[in-house]
Amino acid sequence: MIQKTISRICFMMILTAVLASCSSAYQIAGKSDINSLDGKKLYLKTLSENGWLPVDSASVEHGLFSMEGVSDSTMMVSIYMDDESIMPIILENGIIQVSINTGDMRAWGTPLNNALYNFFDQRSSLEDQLNNLDRREAQMVLNGANIDEVHAQMLKESEELNRKMNEYILSFIKDNYNNVLGPSVFMMMCSSMPYPMMTDQVEDILRGAPDIFKQHPMVQEFITKAQENMKLIEEQQLLRQNMAEKERAGINPANQ
């Protein structure tokens, strides 16, 4: 009887350890120099089929706030104040440092948060270089350079920077196919589209993607809608083509 009891206790200890390893115990240590946040409540929210759902919350007191808990899995969440999204973070095992300051918001201290905000920094650097091209062009023309030559040079630099930007984003997504960063950054990239569509860039990402990436709910939904949209576009193009052919043949479509 005692032996059986000990065996059950050992089994429960092992089971608890296994279950704990599947969960993510997180601690968030946050600070802010924005006075208007003092006394406000911040929420962690995750995107679900029913919209953004709260995961945790904390009040800001004297520029400091903290949260801790256990999550069933590592996931992308966003820090909200009321209905306004402030910044994304990865809810993962460990102590996550969060800074919400004027002109700079970031999270660090855990592997995926470090990777995410390093990605943001690299992307921001390339965007700054792109945004600086117009100022450089104007300055060079004011200094007496030939406007056509300057414009051609800036166009070439813009194309090169855009190429670097696309390659960097693609590389980051592919390097993170198997964790939450891949699908999350993929959806950030796709959010700039007017509607979901299968571009060369999207097809390149999906071509070598493992099932764990393609079966992510948000990625699956995007692929489904993009394929539906592409089918509609093809049908509309075929319809216009048929109408144009009838017009060239002297057939009035209205009489059909």
Image (cartoon, helix red, strand yellow):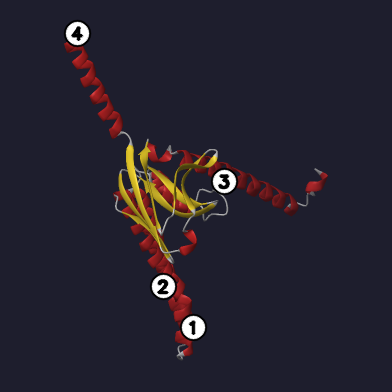
Q: Is residue 136 visible?
A: yes
Residue 51 percent coordinates (x, y):
54, 42
The tag earlier along the polypeptide, 3 or 2, is 2
- Per the model, the C-alpha gap separating discs 2 and 1 is 15 Å
Secondary element at image label 4: loop
> Which image quadrant is residue 125 in?
bottom left
Q: For label 2, count other residues whose C-alpha is less than 10 Å away and answer few (under 14), some (14-19) or many (20+).
A: some
Residue annotated with mark 2: 157
Secondary element at image label 3: helix
Q: Which label was assigned to residue 1?
A: 4
Q: Quadrant of the C terminus?
A: top right
What amino acid type is highlighted by mark number 4?
A: Met
- Per the model, the C-alpha gap separating discs 1 and 4 is 88 Å
Q: Is residue 216 left or right of residue 113?
A: right
- Per the model, the C-alpha gap separating discs 3 and 2 is 32 Å
Secondary element at image label 1: helix
Residue annotated with mark 1: 138
Residue 80 percent coordinates (x, y):
49, 51
Name the residue rendered at 47%, 79% in the picture. Answer: 135
Residue annotated with mark 3: 230
> Which image quadrant is residue 248 in?
bottom right
The tag earlier along the polypeptide, 2 or 4, is 4
- Per the model, the C-alpha gap separating discs 2 and 4 is 79 Å
